[in-house]
Image (cartoon, rainbow, N blue to C red):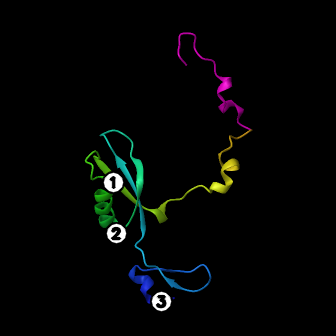
Amino acid sequence: MASSASAGIGYEGQDGADKPETQWPLWEVFTQKDGGAPHEHAGSVHAADAEMALQNARDVYGRRGNVVSMWVIPSAQITASPSDQAGPFFDPGADKIYRHPQFYKIPRGLKGF
C-alpha cells in the first residue's frame, strides 16, 4: 500500500488492483428549519474535513435562508441496516405479543382515535 494513505488519500480497489481515490470523503448533511424542530437529512457533500463540509453544506442546502442549524456527519461513521434483510430485521418479535396494540383498551373518554 502506498504511503499516501496516511496523508488522508485512501486507496480502494474491488478487483485487487490499487486505485487512487480521487474524491474527498462523503459527508451527510442534516438541517434544522426552526428552533426546536428535529434535524432532517438534506443530502450529501464531499469535503476534506468537517469545516469544509459545513461550508459546502451551507452553500448547497442553506442558501435559501430557512435553516437555523446544520449537522455534518462522515458517511463512513454511519451504520445502516442491510436493505436486503429488511424483513427479518424489522419484523416484530413474535415472543412479545404484549407489544401489539390490540392488547390495550382505549379509554371511553378518548375520541377521534
Instruction: Mark 2 or mark 3: name the one nearer the start of the chain.
Output: 3
Disc 1, SS: helix
Nearest to the observer: residue 4 or residue 98: 4
Q: Name the residue tied to disc 1.
A: 61
Is 102 rendered above or below residue 2?
above
Q: Is residue 104 in the magenta section?
A: yes
Q: Quadrant of residue 54?
A: bottom left
Disc 3, SS: loop
Picture coordinates of residue 8 (x, y %)? 40, 79
| Prevailing SS of the magenta stretch | loop
Three-letter residue code for mark 2: Asp
Q: Is residue 94 in the magenta section?
A: no
Picture coordinates of residue 89 (x, y %)? 66, 49
Disc 2 crowd, CA 10 A, few/some/many (<14, 14-19, 20+): few
Disc 2, SS: loop
Q: How many marks?
A: 3
**Cα gap from disc 2 to disc 3, whole angstroms:** 22 Å
| The furthest residue to the right | 95
**Cα gap from disc 2 to disc 1, whole angstroms:** 18 Å
Q: Are marks 2 and 3 in contact (CB under 8 Å)?
A: no
Q: Are marks 1 and 3 in contact (CB under 8 Å)?
A: no
Q: Quadrant of residue 26?
A: bottom left
Nearest to the observer: residue 87 or residue 100: 87
Is 56 rendered above or below residue 31?
below
Nearest to the observer: residue 20 or residue 9: 20
Q: Quadrant of residue 60?
A: bottom left
Disc 3 crowd, CA 10 A, few/some/many (<14, 14-19, 20+): few
Q: Residue at x 29, y 65 (%)?
A: 51
Q: Which mark is residue 2?
A: 3
Which segment is the magenta one?
A: 95-113
Nearer mark to the viewer, of 1 and 3: 1
Q: Name the residue tied to disc 2.
A: 49
